[in-house]
């Protein structure tokens, strides 16, 4: 059984139903957590996105505060230190969820992928599968915090070249429709202005990577975004970004679209 199948591997259409119906979950033995993901300190998990943003910023000309604000605007929830990003976030066809572990997030994607879902966002920067999967080797790559952050940085660089400012690039990262972009920019700016300096860290923590293989993707479509109402996975059908404006429990529901 393959652990990872490349997303754009050429698979004969007659064989798709037989060998690639869904995502096949398995644990990789190449790396490991020092502790079980369930026993990880939530603050340590929330720091993963900031570490990934730091690496992506160092490798690009995207300011670190822009990446840190984007990941919070996309996935932020209330924590001990205020609004914190969450790497195991999935936005599935307009319904957003936070998951306590990477394995739970991937199992959720697998379940919905099997039923035909293709419009979903994953990871620290909520990269959309339907629009952007061709830039990744696999869904595992899309979930990887550093790979996710690097792609977001490249996308923001391209948008900065087009729009001429990081603030406008942030708005276009969410939507090219002005009314949606403007609402997103207002939230992004508020979050960026409230950022505290990032503590220096040597590197990302070691983690056990849960992997899955994916069938050949469908044709690209439109990106959707959604918001979350509960810290461990309650959903809302309303459209918007994954961001509570309060610094508390993460219960605020503010729709962007």
Image: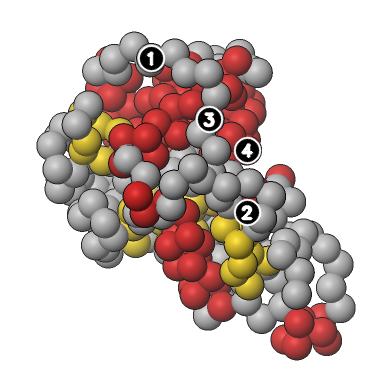
Name the secondary structure under disc 2.
Answer: helix
| Label 3: how many Cα within 10 Å (few below 14, some 14–19, many 20+) | some
| Label 2: how many Cα within 10 Å (few below 14, some 14–19, many 20+) | many
Considering only order in the chain, which callout, 2 or 3, is on the residue closer to the N terminus? 2
Q: CA distance from mark 2 to mark 4?
A: 10 Å
Place residue 96 in its image quadrant: bottom left
Considering only order in the chain, which callout, 3 or 4, is on the residue closer to the N terminus? 4
Position of residue 48 in the picture relative to residue 15 (left or right): left
Place residue 140 in its image quadrant: bottom right
> Is 113 drawn above or below residue 62 in the view shown?
below
Q: CA distance from mark 1 to mark 2?
A: 28 Å
Q: Does the residue at mark 2 contact the one at mark 4 (Cβ under 8 Å)?
A: no
- To which residue does mark 2 refer? 140
Residue 229 position, x and y percent, is 21, 54
Q: Does the residue at mark 1 contact the one at mark 4 (Cβ under 8 Å)?
A: no
Position of residue 25 in the picture relative to residue 71 (left or right): right
Name the secondary structure under disc 3.
Answer: loop
Residue 107 position, x and y percent, is 48, 68
Considering only order in the chain, which callout, 1 or 3, is on the residue closer to the N terminus? 1
- To which residue does mark 4 refer? 147
Residue 135 position, x and y percent, is 71, 45
- To which residue does mark 1 refer? 199
Q: Does the residue at mark 1 contact the one at mark 2 (Cβ under 8 Å)?
A: no
Considering only order in the chain, which callout, 2 or 1, is on the residue closer to the N terminus? 2
Name the secondary structure under disc 4.
Answer: helix
């Amino acid at each position: 059984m393959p652990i990872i199948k490349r997303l754009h591997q050429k698979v004969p259409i007659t064989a798709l139903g037989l060998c690639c119906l869904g995502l096949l979950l398995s644990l990789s033995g190449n790396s490991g957590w020092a502790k079980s993901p369930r026993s990880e300190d939530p603050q340590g998990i929330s720091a993963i996105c900031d570490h990934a943003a730091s690496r992506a910023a160092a490798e690009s000309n995207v300011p670190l505060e822009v990446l840190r604000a984007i990941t919070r605007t996309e996935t932020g929830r209330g924590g001990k230190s205020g609004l914190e990003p969450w790497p195991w976030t999935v936005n599935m066809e307009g319904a957003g969820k936070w998951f306590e572990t990477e394995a739970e997030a991937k199992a959720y994607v697998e379940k919905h992928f099997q039923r035909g879902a293709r419009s979903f966002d994953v990871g620290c920067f909520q990269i959309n599968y339907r629009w952007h999967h061709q830039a990744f080797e696999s869904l595992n790559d899309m979930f990887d915090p550093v790979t996710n952050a690097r792609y977001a940085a490249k996308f923001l660089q391209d948008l900065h070249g087009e729009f001429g400012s990081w603030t406008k690039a942030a708005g276009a990262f969410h939507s090219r429709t002005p009314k949606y972009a403007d609402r997103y920019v207002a939230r992004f700016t508020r979050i960026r202005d409230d950022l505290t300096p990032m503590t220096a860290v040597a590197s990302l923590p070691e983690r056990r990577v849960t992997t899955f293989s994916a069938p050949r993707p469908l044709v690209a479509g439109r990106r959707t975004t959604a918001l979350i109402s509960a810290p461990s996975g309650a959903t809302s059908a309303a459209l918007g970004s994954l961001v509570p404006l309060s610094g508390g429990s993460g219960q605020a529901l503010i729709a962007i679209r």
